[in-house]
Image (cartoon, rainbow, N blue to C red):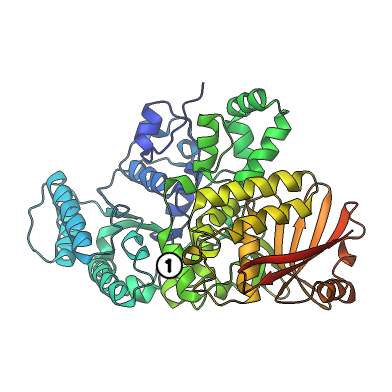
Amino acid sequence: MANYPIGIQTFSEIRNNDYLYVDKTKYIYEVTHPGKYVFLSRPRRFGKSLLTSTFDAYFSGRKDLFKGLAIEKLEKEWKQYPVLHFDLSDIKEGVVENFEESVRSSLASMEETYGVEKTADNLATRFKELVERIYKRTGKQVVVLIDEYDAPLLTVLHDPERLEKMRTALQSFYSPIKKLDPYLRFVFITGITKFSQLSIFSQLNNLNNISMLPQYAAMCGITIKELEDNFQEGIGVLAEIYHYSHQQVIDKLLYHYDGYHFSEDSEGVLNPFSLLSAMNNRKFGNYWFSTGTPTFLVNMLKHFHADITKIDGSEVWASDFDQPTENMQSILPLFYQSGYITIKDYDPIMQFYTLGYPNEEVKVGLMRILIPYYVHTNNVEASHAVGRMYQALRKDDMDGCLKAMQEFISTIPYQENTLKDAPTTEGHFTAMLYVMFSLLNVYVESQVRNAKGRLDILIKTDTTIYVMELKMNGDLDKALQQINEKDYTIPFKSDGRKVVKVAINFSTEDRTIKEWKIEK
C-alpha cells in the first residue's frame, strides 16, 4: 500500500521514509532562477510548509533527496548555502511577547548551528548580524525562509489595537532584509493572507508576489493529471470499497476536493491534505475543517456584517479580493486568501472575476461552522434536523422537508434563538435557510439574478429544481405571483428536471416558518 504523508511537512522525512511525494521540484528550480525575493500565499493545509522545507533541502545541497525528481535534470551545480528557516505557524495567540520568544529561540538555535555568538538583544539587530557573520565565516550568501509569516496576525485581525502591535513587531524584525541584500541568495516568504508590503516588509520593495501568476498556479495542490499519475492504487481501493468505477471515484474526489483556481484560466487543483486523508482513511470525508475551527474567520464575518448568501457567485475586480488583508473593506479578500472561495470564472473584457466555493467539502464545512451564528447553538440538534430534511428531499418531498425545518426552528429556546439579537429581517431569514439547505448535499444558490429581479433561493436536486420566494410576515399568494411575474422559472424550463415553485412565509412573532405553499 502507498505510504501517505498525513501531516508530514518535512521534505527529507518524506523522501527518506518512502512516503508518496507528488513532484513539485520543477517549480523550485523555476522560482529560484533567477528569483531572489519571493512571496506566495495559499490556504492552510495546502502544502506551504512542505514547499518551504523543499527549498530548505535544495539550498542545503541535499542532492540525494531529489533523485528521480524533475529538478535532478534541471540543476547542474547543486551549491550548498547556509539556510535560516523561520516557522511562525505555532504563534497563534496574537501576543507580541510570544512572537519575540519564538524568534529568540530560533535565532539561538541558528547561532549555535553556524558557530556565531550572540551580539545583541534586539531581535532585528541580532538577525542582521547573524546573516552578516555567517556570510563572513562561510563566504556564502544566506537563504532566508519564512513559513506562515502571518500566523501571529490572523487571530487579531478584528482587534485593531493588538493587530497594530503585532504588525509593528513583525515589521521591526523583518526590516533588515533589504539592507542584507549583498549577503542573501534567496528569500522565500509564505502565509495564508496578503498583508501590505508597506505594513510588514516596509523596506522590501522588490518582493515578487507570485500568488496569482498562472505559471505557479499548481505549485501547491494536486492537479487532475497528478491525481491520475500518483494515486492509482488509492483510487482502486476506493473503487472497491464503494463499488464505484475508476472514473466515478475520480469524479467523487473532484466533487469533494477539487476546484481551487489561483489565477484566471489556470488549471484547478485539489486540496492535498483532504485528498491524502481520503486515500489514507479509504473514505470520502470533510477533512479540511476537522483540523481546526477558523475562529478568526467567524470574527471577521461579524466585523463586516457579511451577508453569507451573497459571497458565492460574487463578481468583482481583482482589487476587490487580491488586496492587503488589513485594508479590506469586505470579507472577500480573507475568504479568497483563506481558501473558502476561489476563482470560478473570468471575463477578460470587463476584467471581472467570479468567485465561489471551490468544492462540496468547503461549502458544507463552512455551513456547519456557521450554524451557531445563523441557526442554533446546538450543532447536534441542527444535524438531526438536517438529516430529516435530507430524507424528505431525497423523496422530492419539499413539504416534509419544510415541516422538519419548521419543527426544528420552533423548538429553539428563545434565549438560544439567533434571531433574538439579530435584525428580524428577510435577509437573516434567507441566510438561515441558505445555511440549512446548503448542508443537504444539493446545489443551493441565493439571490439569483435575472432580467427582472432576484429570486431568493434556488435548489437543484437530481430530479427537481425548486424556485423559492421568501417573505417575512407576508402573503404566500403574492410571493407566488412574484415568481410568475418576474419569470424566475423560465431559465430552467429546458433543463429536463421538474420545476417547482415554493413560497415561504416567516413569522417574526412566532420566530419560525409560519406557512408555505408549493406549486408544481
Tag 1: residue type? Asn
Instruction: Tell me residue 67's x, y (percent).
Output: 43, 30
Horizontal relation, residue 56 to residue 318: left or right = left
Horizontal relation, residue 500 to residue 250: left or right = right
**Toward which corner of the image does residue 315 lie, by quadrant?**
bottom right
Say which residue appears at 23% left-offset and 68% top-offset. 176
| Count of numbered marks | 1
Instruction: Tell me residue 271's x, y (percent).
Output: 54, 46
Where 161 falls versus 298 (above or below)? below
From the image, tell me which residue sits under label 1.
Answer: 299
Instruction: Tell me residue 464's x, y (percent).
Output: 83, 52
Where 188 falls versus 276 (above or below)? below
Instruction: Tell me residue 195's x, y (percent).
Output: 40, 70
Horizontal relation, residue 114 to residue 274: left or right = left
Q: Is residue 249 visible?
A: yes
Say which residue appears at 57% left-offset and 58% top-offset. 411
Q: Is residue 310 visible?
A: no
Q: Residues within 10 Å of mark 1 (few under 14, many from 20)?
A: some
Q: Helix, strand, or loop for circle 1?
A: helix
**Toward which corner of the image does residue 503 lie, by quadrant?**
bottom right
Say which residue appears at 54% left-offset and 43% top-offset. 286
Where 158 falls versus 4 (above or below)? below
Q: In which quadrant will I find the C terminus?
A: bottom right
